[in-house]
Amino acid sequence: MAEELAILDQRVISALQVDGRAAPGRIAEVLGVSARTVTRSLTRLAPHVRVVRVPSPEHGLRGATLLRVRVLRGRVEVLADSLAQRPEVLFVDVLAGGEEISAVVLGGVPRLPSNAITSVQPLSVLHVFSDAADWRTGLLTPDETAALTPPAPTDQVTPDDLDRNLLDRLTTDARTGPGPLAAASGVPESTVRRRLDRLTAGGHVRTYTVADPRLFGLTVDANVWMTVPPGRLDALGRRLAEHPMVHGTLATTGPTNLTAAVFCRDLPALYEFVTGLHDIPSAEVTVVGSAVKRAGLRR
């Protein structure tokens, strides 16, 4: 089981949440420690933390489907592993109890073995209020966060073949530098730097720091499936997206139309969160037993 990290290491991960491509020297300057200290921290964190590139909702999450799959006892691990192997499947969670899987899929519902499942509930994603890349630990001050936050996208960019090649390589390791990218792509480093600047200005180099929440002392990962009146959906979704415990908020089709993914220190903290939803007419709570795949990476 992952153990809670020292506060310095937690703050370094928090800096990567804000800018996954920030250099050690930049992180050190903002956090008020030496570059050597940050470099040592990044070395310690390497086995536990991955920084990947993820699409923004505007560029890559149109047409996504949130699946809830009820599975026959004894078949959940096989089905979860099968889903995790598919590139179009970004997230796979096995819910506590071991008889239900939730997954986020780009596109329609994948073909599933009929002899392993009892029901499939596909929920089309109508709007993304926040996703995993938006979540912050809250361990940085507002000034530190502002200092690390990259400039907002300013240009409309349509990636060409070279751009897509670079973005594909950043998808599995978003901290790859221009030199290695140039060597792998067979183009001059100066060209890669210009392309990265252009892609960043277009909002295509968005990073997500994948880390086990237990490293921050957050032992419970839960989903809250809510049914709210349509006229209040937008306001409630935006409010939940700003909550420090929430690491994803989606408006969907289906019997539940608002879903929030929540990290909590323990079950009493989850209870406090749920009982604080005073103006939510109906909510179902499920706890994640195991995170099989996050942001395209298998655990």
Image (cartoon, helix red, strand yellow):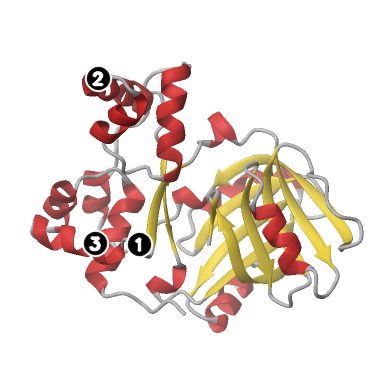
Q: Are marks 3 and 2 in contact (CB under 8 Å)?
A: no
- Residue at 69% across / 75% down in the picture? 96
Q: Quadrant of residue 192?
A: top left
Q: Amino acid at mark 1?
A: Gly
| Residue bearing mark 2 | 188
Label 3 sits on what residue type? Thr
Q: Identify whether 91 is placed above or below 58.
A: below
**Which residue is disc 3 drawn over?**
43
Badge 2: how crowded within 10 Å, few (<14), some, or many (20+)? few
Q: Secondary structure at mark 1?
A: loop
Label pair 1/3, CB-CB below 8 angstroms: no
Depth check: give the residue in front, 267 or 163.
Answer: 163
Q: Nearer the viewer, mark 3 or mark 2?
A: 2
Which badge, 3 or 2, is on the more N-terminal residue? 3
- Neighbour tally class for label 3: few under 14, some 14-19, many 20 plus, Cα within 10 Å: few
Amino acid type assigned to the residue bearing label 2 in the image: Pro
Q: Nearer the viewer, residue 233 or 52?
A: 52
Residue 132, x across and y down, in percent: 50, 52
Which mark is on residue 166?
none
Q: Residue at x 35, y 62 (%)?
A: 138
Residue 294 on image: x %, y %: 55, 55
Specify the label residue 138 is tagged with: 1
Does residue 269 appear to the left or right of 11 in the view shown?
right
